[in-house]
Image: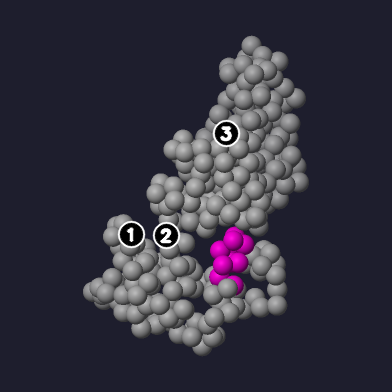
């Protein structure tokens, strides 16, 4: 059996890999498990691992991580797959895969291909509520959505923060979410733009100041700002299409896109082009001249 585990949902990906490994160890023992760093291992070593007989067990499992980074192995993936013995289970753990490559196409067509991608926000909120219940804690659907809005959609981060909140108080309330978690910089930059578009320059500058107080570099804030403007532009020029359609075509997460669509309705095409051009000018000048990026961004936010 040859299984490929891939996708951008690191939490579900690791969870499923560990489930497969734990079940195998329970049946065959730890000596029958072999883990290989595919990015560094020699091709012949990998080939030998999938062909060799198990030691003191009826089967063996070989878990190979990030094989795509190994040029020779990736080019000879079909040979590796066809060489797997009947007594070996091969698990190819490949979180990030270029779908345009022959390597990806071989994995998809010749292995048991399992892809784990980020959940939609609504499904993610339901998952958080259920995970809280498993921890003997209580989280409302509304506060689950608030937690996602505050931290983003990374399931691994959400799970880790949920465990912390659950240990602090079984009744997971919004005040404790504010107390114990740090707002995702992406969410803060979105709020900054929201305040700017609403004409609330004081709030926008306060949000910027909070990021700087938390030691977030001005250049990093500029990069986040550029990314948010990019998402807004995609949302604006995707008019007439659903969030899911735009997200699929642009290959971006639908959650930030959905938020950006609300902002996109409140700004003209000309204004958006101006904001992008001015942000690009700050970036260019920061890399060409001795520009104070912090002061430039404060001016940008105050006058935009």
Task: Name the image quarter holding residue 204.
Answer: bottom left
| Residue 253 lies within the magenta run | yes
Looking at the image, residue 86 sits to the left or right of residue 237; the answer is: right
| Image depth: mark 1 or mark 3 in front | 3
Q: Position of residue 164 (x, y in %)?
A: 46, 39
Q: Which residue sits at x=56%, y=67%?
A: 259
Measured along the vertical axis of the image, is residue 193 above or below residue 244?
A: below
Visible in this render: residue 228? Answer: yes
- Which residue is identified by label 3? 136
Instruction: Residue 255: say if magenta.
Output: yes
Mark 3 lies on a secondary structure that is: loop
**Residue at the disc numbered 2:** 185
State which tag comes first along the sequence, 2 or 3: 3
Q: CA distance from mark 2 to mark 3?
A: 30 Å
Residue at the top extreme of this rendering: 56
Which residue is at a point 63% across and 41% down the rendered structure image?
A: 130
Eyeballing the image, is 177 above or below 276?
above
The numbered disc on residue 216 is 1
The numbered dot on residue 113 is: none
């Amino acid at each position: 059996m040859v299984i490929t585990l891939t996708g951008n949902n690191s939490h579900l990906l690791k969870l499923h890999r560990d489930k497969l490994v734990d079940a195998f160890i329970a049946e065959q023992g730890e000596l029958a498990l072999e883990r290989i760093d595919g990015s560094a291992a020699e091709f012949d070593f990998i080939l030998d691992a999938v062909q060799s007989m198990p030691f003191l067990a009826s089967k063996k499992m070989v878990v190979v991580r990030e094989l795509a980074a190994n040029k020779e192995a990736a080019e000879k993936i079909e040979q590796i797959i066809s060489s797997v013995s009947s007594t070996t289970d091969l698990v190819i753990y490949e979180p990030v895969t270029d779908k345009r490559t022959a390597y990806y196409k071989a994995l998809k067509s010749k292995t048991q291909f399992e892809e784990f991608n980020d959940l939609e926000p609504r499904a993610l909120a339901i998952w958080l509520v259920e995970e809280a219940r498993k921890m003997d804690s209580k989280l409302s659907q509304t506060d689950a959505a608030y937690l996602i809005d505050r931290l983003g959609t990374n399931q691994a981060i959400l799970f880790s923060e949920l465990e912390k909140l659950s240990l602090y108080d079984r009744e997971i309330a919004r005040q404790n979410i504010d107390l114990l978690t740090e707002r995702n910089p992406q969410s803060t930059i979105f709020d900054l733009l929201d305040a700017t578009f609403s004409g609330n320059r004081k709030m926008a500058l306060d949000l910027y100041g909070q990021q700087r107080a938390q030691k977030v570099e001005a250049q990093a804030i500029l990069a986040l700002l550029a990314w948010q403007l990019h998402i807004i532009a995609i949302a604006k020029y995707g008019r007439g299409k659903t969030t899911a359609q735009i997200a699929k075509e642009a290959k971006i997460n639908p959650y930030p896109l959905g938020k950006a669509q609300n902002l996109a309705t409140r700004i003209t095409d000309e204004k958006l082009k101006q904001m992008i051009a001015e942000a690009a000018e700050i970036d260019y000048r920061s890399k060409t001249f001795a520009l104070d990026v912090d002061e430039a961004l404060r001016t940008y936010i105050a006058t935009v």
